[in-house]
Image (cartoon, rainbow, N blue to C red):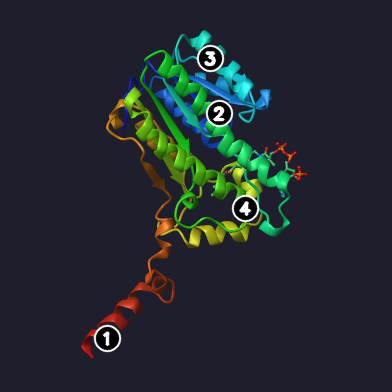
Amino acid sequence: MFKEDTLSGKTILITGGGSGLGLAMAKAFAHTGADIAICGRTEEKLEKAVKEIEKERDGAVARYYQCDVRDYDGVTSMFEQIIDDFGSLEGLVNNAAGNFLSASEDLSPGGFKAIIDIVLHGSFNCTHVFGNYLIDNKKEGNILNMVTTYAEGTGCAFVLPSACGKAGVLAMTRSLAFEWAEYGIRLNAIAPGPFPTEGAWSRLVPKKVMEKKFIEKIPLKRVGEPEELANLAVFLMSDLSSYMTGECVVIDGGERLQAGQFNFIDGLMSRSKLKKLFKAMKAK
Ligand code: HXC
C-alpha cells in the first residue's frame, strides 16, 4: 500500500515503542522510510527493539531513550537529546499507556493516579514539549495519539482510570488540532479495538473465556493484527493524510457497532433461520 519513501525525511518518536503496538508502528515507520526514536522505562526491551527496527530497512536509524513519560523534566531532556542526535524531529506517537482491571470501588487513589499520570499527563508532557519545539522553530509536525474505542461515548466498566485518561487524550487531540493548526501541527488519534499484545492481554484478558467473548462480539469475528494498526498509523503520520486533523479513526473489526438496537438478533439464531422468520413476517 505504501512506498519505501512514504515517510522518508521524517524522524518519529514513539513512546512505549519497545514492545506491542508501539514496536509494530515503529517497524512500519522504519520500513516506509522514517528514522525512529523510541522511549520506555526498560532498557533491555528498548535495546532489543532498536535492533529489530533497524532490520526493517537498509540504512534505517533507530535509537532508544530511557524515559518515564510521567516526568516532565525527563521528557524535556529526552526531546533535547533526540533533536541533538537526529538533527530534527517531525513526528510523535503518544502510545505509552497503563491499564489494569479493577472494580472501581476497590481502586486506591494511587492506582487511579498511576494510570492518569501515564496516559494523560504522559501524553500531555510529550505533546507540550514537542509542540513548543515545533512552534519555536517554525516547523510543521504531526502528532498521533493512541486512544481506545471507549474513550468516547460509552466509557468502560472495570478500567475507569484508563477510560478517564483516554477520554482526556481524545479531548486534547481535538483541542490542539484546532489551536495548533495555525502552526501547521496536525493531531489525530487511533481508537483500536482488541489487539492482543503481551502487555495489554496479560493485564486485561486473564482468562481464555474472555478472549472468546471478545471475539464473539466483533462482527469480523477475529482480533486485530498489529500490522493492520501499523498501516493506519503510517497513513496518519504521512503526508497522504495532510488534510486530516482532529480525527479519531476507529479500527476494531466493527466491535463498536454492537450498540445497534436490533444487532442482538443476529446472535439468536442462524442467518438462514432469521431469513425464514423475516419472510414469514412479511407474508402475514
Ligand atoms: C489495582 C493496582 C494494580 C492492579 C497497580 N495498582 N496494579 N491497583 N489493581 N492490578 C496500583 C498500586 O497498588 C499502586 O497504588 C499504584 O497502582 C501504582 O502501582 P505501581 O506498581 O507502584 O506503579 P508502576 O510501577 O508505576 O506501574 C504502573 C502500572 C503498571 C500501570 C500499575 O501496570 C504498568 O507499568 N503498566 C504499563 C504497561 C501497561 O499497563 N500496558 C497495558 C496498556 S493496554 P498505591 O495506592 O499502592 O500507590 C491499554 C489498552 C487499552 O491501555 C485498550 C484495551 C482493549
Disc 1 and disc 3: Cα gap in Å?
Answer: 66 Å
Kind of residue sitting beneath label 3: Ile
Which marked residue is nearer to the observer: mark 1 or mark 3? 3
Element at badge 2? helix
Quadrant that contains the C terminus: bottom left
Is the residue indicated by label 1 positioned so its CB lies within 8 Å of ligand 1?
A: no
- The residue to which callout 2 is attached is 125
Quadrant for the N terminus in the image: top left
| Mark 4 or mark 2, earlier in chain | 2
Q: Is residue 103 visible?
A: no
- Residue 113 in percent (x, y) is at 67, 42
Q: Which residue is mark 1?
A: 281
Q: Rounded to the nearest whole Å, what is the CA distance between mark 4 and mark 2?
A: 29 Å
Q: Quadrant of ligand 1?
A: top right
- For residue 122, above or below residue 257: above
Q: How far apart are the alpha carbons under marks 1 and 4?
A: 41 Å
**Percent of width and height locating residue 93:** 48, 30
Name the amino acid, label 1: Met
Residue occupying image coordinates x 33% and y 19%: 5
Structural distance between the alpha carbons of marks 1 and 2: 59 Å
Toward the bottom, the furthest residue is 284
Mark 2 or mark 3: which comes first in sequence?
A: 3
SS category of the residue bearing label 1: helix
Residue tagged 3 = 82
Q: Which residue is mark 4?
A: 205
